[in-house]
Amino acid sequence: MRVLLLTHAFNSLTQRLYVELAALGHELSVEFDINDRVTEEAAALFRPHLILAPYLRRAIPEAVWREYLCLVVHPGPPGDRGPSALDRAILDGERAWGVTVLRATAEMDAGPVWAAETFALRPARKSSLYRDEVTEAAVRAVRTALDRLPDYRAGRWRPAAPPPQPLRPLLRQAERAIDWARDDTAAVLRRIASADGAPGVADRLFGQPCHLYHARPFAARGAPGEVLGRVGEGIVRATTDGAVWIGHAKRSGGIKLPVALAFPEAAALPALAGDDAAIRYAEADGVGYLHFDFYNGAMGTAACERLLAAYEAARRRPTRVIVLMGGTDFFSNGLDLNRIEAAESPADASWRNIEAMDDLCRAVIETDGQLTVAALQGNAGAGGAFLALAADRVWARRGVVLNPHYKNMGNLYGSEYWTYLLPRRVGADRALDLMRRRLPLGAEEARRIGFLDDCFGETRDAFLAAVTERAAALSNDAEHGRRMSDKRRRRAADEAEKPLAAYRAEELAGMQRNFYGFDASYHVARHHFVHKTPHSWTPRHLARHREIGWRPPEEGPA
Ligand code: COA
């Protein structure tokens, strides 16, 4: 089938559906929901058999849903209606939640139900639930809906109307607001989680309006609402029964940053004992597990340096295997673009950041005392995807989506030794193709082409359990010694053929042009990315129906 993905943005859920539908053999094109006329034009050009809307913020125009079968993915159970479904579920303390695939009709979220799935609502940030449970449920529901299509077309199956329920309007900040005098830790965390990544909870810090993100409980007591001190780049604020640590904030008109960066006033606060808990190391069965859970997978210079120090400490341990665990939601998304944007000289900040990232990658590549594994629980993009390839083995959860390319960020050349790491895994031609096409890569496909060694685990828990088992097996394997000597031999041969320093120098020459050259595309693209500038068109590499030479197909829609 020709399937048009109509979406507000090519976000994680849309990307996952894209790779799943592509794997099923469907012909795909993407159109961003910019205005009704553009949507109508896209449909007329592509003549899709199905329009799938994974992430919309507006209704589909009537002319389109009347002519085409339009299925909307709604992040709520059948009957739930409205734009803040997941936010409300978290705020209301729901234990279970759902995803519904329903047909677009005149009434928002009230069309006939094609498929629905449920999941347990883990206590987590909205964006974390969205990228994991919601996405997995959406994939299952969309598959069911597609399976029902032949019967629907043949008149053998009819979708049922959802239970009639009123539309719940967009959550207003007044409903999200924290009452510091009354809310206990659980309530504060629920409020922040329900709005994290966007839009955040409106509040005040240091007497100024801002939005809050990235919170966790913290063991401290004080007058409710009082800012007690700083820990890492976050602050600690008392609730009625304890305290919370808040890591990120966005000032009015600003961008999302660590609190200490958004508010220089934080420097004057007393430093409390503790750290930001982003880096964690554990050992079992001769295996060292290094977790690095940086907010949004963004790895700034200091984050890379701290992680490198932790990695070097892990190398000095008498282990046989080191597993890079990344974070829960993302393995890594490379350079911290928000921090770079906020720097006095974004070019200098980019340069320092890529050097720190490269130092980290080199340490992994040059590890000669242990076998290394990258275990991707969550997605990885740009430099973060190549950090994973620095390890000897690369495993991913089955639902992971990779974006192993840089060009979307203003034609960035990229470093992280990708010119060494990528071709040796997938071959020179495919490496070039991945970089040029700049499309998401699903884990199954990544395994097929050799980008990953393996992908497994339907859920994160299943993935983690299997990683532990496989890493222990690698550590206890009688072949470990031989593998280590093979690894050292191969590294020495590679180094003799072309030193790592040469790859790095070539890549950094490209990056220097991106950062300091006359073509400012990277700085412009980063600015738009960080400031979340609304799209004004769909990039050509996604909108196939807008490719030069595209002719509307003769047949369809059915
Ligand atoms: N630096 C800072 N923030 C980043 C980031 C980065 N490198 N990568 C992602 N983020 C943030 C996004 O701004 C977004 O923020 P929000 O919480 O305010 O919404 C959040 O992480 C999630 O990103 P989003 O783009 O919504 O996630 P996605 O899963 O839909 O898409 C990517 C993932 C990797 C395709 C996309 O985030 C991306 O292109 N990131 C930039 C990668 C990059 O170019 N890195 C620099 C070169 S190494």
Image (tube, grey):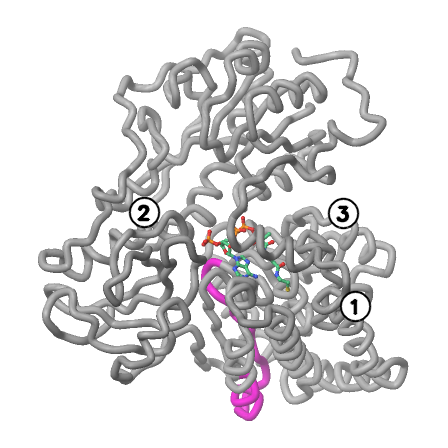
In front: label 3 or label 2: 3
Query: How far is disc 3 from disc 2 in space, using C-alphas?
Result: 36 Å
Name the element at disc 3: helix
**Quadrant of res 505:** bottom right
Name which residue lies at 75% across and 71% down: 512
Q: Is residue 343 above or below residue 119?
A: below
For residue 246, side relative to residue 471 (left or right): left
Front-most of 256 and 94? 256
| Residue drawn at x 40%, y 48% as measured from the top left | 198
The image shows residue 59 at horizontal and vertical percentages of 46, 23
Residue 22 picture quarter = top right
**Count of numbered marks:** 3
Give the answer, above or below, for where 114 lies relative to 408: above
Q: CA distance from mark 2 to mark 1?
A: 45 Å
Q: First in sequence: mark 2 or mark 1?
A: 2
Which quarter of the figure is the N terminus placed in? top right
Q: Position of residue 307 (x, y in %)?
A: 52, 80
Disc sitting over residue 121 in the figure:
2
Query: Callout 1: few (<14), some (14-19), or many (20+) C-alpha neighbours within 10 Å?
Result: some
| Residue 438 appears in the figure | yes
In this view of the protein, can residue 478 be seen by the observer?
Answer: no
Please state which amino acid type lies under the numbered disc 2. Answer: Leu
Badge 3 density bin: few <14, some 14–19, many ≥20, Cα 10 Å: few
Residue 315 is inside the magenta segment: yes
Pointer 3 and pointer 2: residues touching (CB < 8 Å)? no
Which residue, given by chain and number where applicable, does mark 3 sit on? 437
